Image: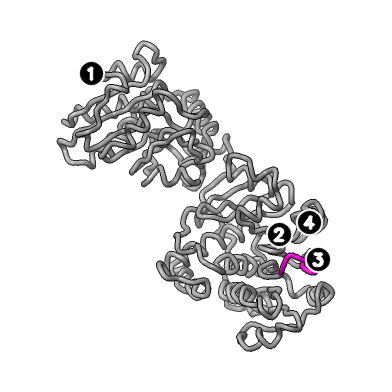
Amino acid sequence: MIELLTPAEMAEADRLTIASGTPGMALMEKAGRAVADVAARQPLGTRVVVACGPGNNGGDGFVAARVLAKRGYPVRLGLLGSLDRLKGDAAEAAAGWKGETVPIAALDYADAGLIIDALFGAGLDRPLTGEAAEAVDAINAAPGRVIAVDLPSGIHGGTGAIMGVAVRADETVTFFRPKPGHVLLPGRVHAGRLTVADIGIAADVLDTIAPKTVLNRKPLWLPALPVPAIEGHKYGRGHAVVVSGGMLHTGAARMAARAALRIGAGLVTVASPPDALATNAAHLTAIMLRRMDGAAGLAEILADERLNAVILGPALGLDAATKDIVRAALGSSAAAVIDADGISVFRDEPEALFALIHARTAPVVLTPHDGEFARLFPDLATLPGKVERAREAAARSGAVVLLKGPDTVVAAPDGRAAIADNAPPHLATAGSGDVLAGMIGGLLAQHMPPFEAASAGVWLHGEAGAVLGRGLIAEDLPEALRQVFSRLFD
């Protein structure tokens, strides 16, 4: 289940299911029971408070309250709004609750061991204010464990953004498929542990909905991941070129080069300015070294089409020479990964970079963090959703765009997007991004399609970080790939 459904797509899944003959109340009953099942992990006798909103999310809460009370839990229920204003399935669910319903402001959470947040789900489209915001603040101030229904109230289902205020849940129970808001920050932090419940929506509704946003998981890219053949040889596994900075800025290129080699490229060459040749030569063994005299030198190296992938940008500098080197790379037939300075150097003329990308047939992957993204796409940097920012940037630039962070998004020009959630915080260290660029370049050298190569690189990078854990430094990451691959294939 790697698909992520926006609130609109989830509403369509509900609609299609109801139109096919499943009553909406049947879906609500299963949803409420799923919440109750998770709540019932608490010992019998735990005091439960259920905070219900005025819509279907509140209806799920009424069902959960009824089921828990029947199982013997002491339950108190509060409603935002009045019973006579409930409609449809929510009104029917409320009618099935035989306990007392008090105004939301009258709820006392002091002795509650468990609080069920059923105020607002993924459909919330405006900031919470007034009594709703006060209810959220009261839940957050309470000592009990919090389970959110569908999404923590106040989290936008499509972007993970906080809509004014938001519940901080220990666990969230959602239905059918996760939403982007469950995995994008800060929504992921507010959601806590995520349970996805089956409430009777058939998977074939996805054929009609055709969602374009997915979780970055193995099924997305594993079928395209290169696997060496017994009769293969190093020349069949591609040749990646990594462009080095000057004498005092060579480490990033070497880390990227080692990552490209570790991830399976058959050969890797560092293209080095003359003043850095001795420094690079002193550190390289299996990785080859070639002299590069500026942009013309790189063009000469890449004229040999056997060198089929190029990684550039880290530590190159923000001057005209770097801009010329990027132009030379994009003028070749090699797949390109452009990172760091290779992105920022075009901050004053991004359209020139995009024109170069659109003019070529070989793939390009751009790997900005938020700051670099804002330099290249200043108008998109203010869009409310990270997926939307990356998707628009990919369409504009013609490149696969990898927008880095603890919730890295990979987006393709055709609208596909993948969100990663496996990156440990230890990856926030100098050089980590250089290694990621090298990993993607190494996969491109092996002829992996760019969206899948970028997605696989992000996932493998995260898993390598998890293997190493606290204390990792960027140089460790390529070495951890051996253990990651062992787990992946064994």
Q: Can residue 241 be seen by looking at this rendering? A: no
The CA span between labels 3 and 2 is 13 Å
The image position of residue 310, as x and y in percent, is 71, 69
Question: Dot 3, crowdedness within 10 Å: few (<14), some or many (≥20)?
Answer: few
Looking at the rendering, in which quadrant would you find the C terminus?
bottom left
The CA span between labels 1 and 4 is 64 Å
Q: Callout 1: helix, strand or loop?
A: loop
Figure check: 442 above or below 413:
below
What residue do we see at 68% from left, 68% from top? Answer: 311
The CA span between labels 3 and 1 is 72 Å
Q: Quadrant of residue 334?
A: bottom right
Out of 197 and 378, give the one closest to the viewer: 378
Out of 456 and 151, give the one closest to the viewer: 151
Q: What residue type is labelled 2?
A: Ile
Say the numbered circle drawn on residue 353.
Answer: 4
The residue labelled by disc 1 is 100
Residue 457 left/right relative to 164: right
Query: Which range is magenta?
Result: 317-323
Q: Which amino acid does label 3 sit on?
A: Ala
Residue 487 left/right relative to 275: left
Question: Dot 4, crowdedness within 10 Å: few (<14), some or many (≥20)?
Answer: many
What residue do we see at 77% from left, 66% from top? Answer: 319
Question: Is there CB contact under 8 Å for labels 1 and 2?
Answer: no
Q: Which amino acid does label 1 sit on?
A: Glu
The residue labelled by disc 3 is 320
The residue labelled by disc 2 is 343
Residue 142 part of the magenta-drawn span:
no
| Foreground label between 1 and 2 | 2
What residue do we see at 16% from left, 37% from top? Answer: 44
